[in-house]
Amino acid sequence: MSAAYRDGDAVPAGAHAPDVGPARRRLRRHLIEWAVMIAVALAITLGVRGYVVQTFLVPSSSMEPTLLVGDRILVDKLAVDWGEINRGDVVVFHSPPNEDCAGGHEAILVKRVIGLPGDHLYSIGDTIYVDGRPLKEAWPHTEPLGPPAVASPRHPYVVGADRYFVMGDNHASSCDSRYWGTISRGAIIGKVFLRVWPVSRFGFL
């Protein structure tokens, strides 16, 4: 007949205490496995955030109606590192040092690419021309090219090598390349591809 022992009871001579070693080892192994999985998950999350996708908050109305103040957007970094930048892409980038339209410097900006390297830009009235062709915009637009609009069909504004001319969709309320010039490819963090907040405005760009 097996005997039961209470905690604290002396174990009679010749009797063997229950072997809890294997159970403890299994528990410790499970804890280590969970710790490793959590560490790997955190590393992947931080890696994705740092090198693949990053979230940004839209701080101003310069991209209305495409992006509203307070929208949260996802930016694809690999689309710039390994892909092409096309006219019409919405990009997030490090602002140039001379950006101070609002009386203060914004470190990160979001705008739409209007001109690519080598493009010739000018405006007539409220129409922007790229290489002599009217820019087909799918977003509202009521402003001419802006300060560089001294450019004319005879003397267009030429986008330099590895440079990009960017503007906000809300042309009338956007501080952009019309005021501080083009941006380099190296300044571009990534392309905006998804609006994640608010839920009512969730959708791909």
Image (cartoon, helix red, strand yellow):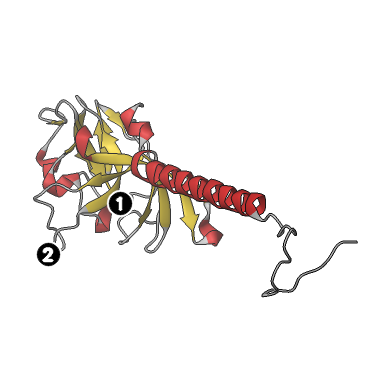
Residue 58 sits above or below residue 32 on the image: below
Residue 205 sits above or below residue 157 on the image: below
Point out residue 198 in the picture as x, y percentages from the top left corner: 50, 62
Spatial CA distance of label 2 from label 1 is: 24 Å
Residue 28 as seen in the image, left or right of residue 44: right
Q: Quadrant of residue 61?
A: bottom left
* Front one among 60 and 142: 60
> Residue at position x 52%, y 57% from top?
201
Residue 16 as seen in the image, left or right of residue 49: right
Dot 2 or dot 1: first in sequence order is 2
> Residue at position x 40%, y 55% from top?
67
* Front one among 82 and 152: 82
Residue 13 is labelled as none
> Residue at position x 13%, y 63% from top?
104
* Front one among 131 and 164: 164
Q: Please say whether residue 141 is visible from this viewpoint.
A: yes
* Residue identifier under label 1: 142
Looking at the rendered structure, the kind of residue marked 2 is Gly
Residue 111 as seen in the image, left or right of residue 67: left
Point out residue 55 in the picture as x, y percentages from the top left corner: 39, 52
Looking at the rendered structure, the kind of residue marked 1 is Thr
Query: Furthest-front residue in view?
Result: 13
* Residue identifier under label 2: 103
Point out residue 24 in the picture as x, y percentages from the top left corner: 61, 54
